[in-house]
Amino acid sequence: MRRDFPRKVKAQAILRANGCCEACSAKLKVGEAEVDHILPDALGGDPVLSNARVLCRVCHRAKSSDDIGRIRKADRQRDKHTAASAKPSRIRSRGFEKPPAQRRASSPLAKKLPPRRMG
Ligand SMILES: [Zn+2]
């Protein structure tokens, strides 16, 4: 469940930011300010002023994609943890089977490019 900032907190945050992006200091037009969770709500951040940051759209987009990475990582860690405690034997299946090591001339890793001449 997403807990967005109450309107009052948003207003306070925008007031605090003085109409500027708090990340890159870009001047924001009316309606352009986006109030961001410093700690994403998915990671336990509360919708309070101390967790609010006013961002322009560019910064908000950059921050949000960064958040997604952090949230996914937290999910992975949690899954790992719960899987380890709840189902101890399930993960111990075959896993990744590695093919026997063989030298293939066509392998991109084995092939070294000749040094490129500059100029
Ligand atoms: Zn910005």
Image: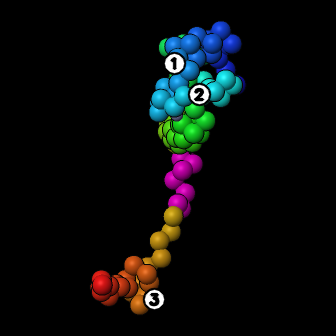
Q: Report the disc number at residue 28.
A: 2
Q: Is residue 62 visible?
A: yes
Q: CA distance from mark 3 to mark 1?
A: 57 Å
Q: Nearer the viewer, residue 62 or 30?
A: 30
Q: Amino acid at mark 1?
A: Ala
Count of labels in the image: 3
Q: Amino acid at mark 2?
A: Leu
Q: CA distance from mark 2 to mark 1?
A: 10 Å
Q: Nearer the viewer, residue 34 or 26?
A: 26
Quadrant housing the C terminus? bottom left
Kindly indicate whether the residue at mark 1 contacts the one at mark 2 (C-beta within 8 angstroms). yes
Residue at far bottom of view: 105
Disc 1 beta carbon < 8 A from ligand 1? no
Q: Is residue 64 visible?
A: no
Mark nearer the N terminus (3 vs 1) = 1
The stretch in magenta equals 89-95
10 Å neighbourhood of mark 1: few (<14), some, or many (≥20)? some
Q: Say which residue appears at 54% left-offset and 41% top-offset.
A: 62
Q: Say which residue appears at 47% left-offset and 33% top-offset.
A: 24
Mark nearer the N terminus (3 vs 2) = 2
Q: Which residue is mark 3?
A: 106
Expressed as whole percent of the image width and height from the top left, the position of residue 65 reads 57, 42
Q: Say which residue appears at 51% left-offset and 31% top-offset.
A: 26
10 Å neighbourhood of mark 2: few (<14), some, or many (≥20)? some
Q: CA distance from mark 3 to mark 2?
A: 55 Å
Q: Say which residue appears at 51% left-offset and 18% top-offset.
A: 17
Kindly indicate whether the residue at mark 1 contacts the one at mark 3 (C-beta within 8 angstroms). no
Q: Nearer the viewer, residue 110 or 41?
A: 41
Q: Secondary structure at mark 2?
A: loop
Expressed as whole percent of the image width and height from the top left, the position of residue 92 reads 51, 53
Mark nearer the N terminus (2 vs 1) = 1
Q: Report the disc number at residue 17.
A: 1
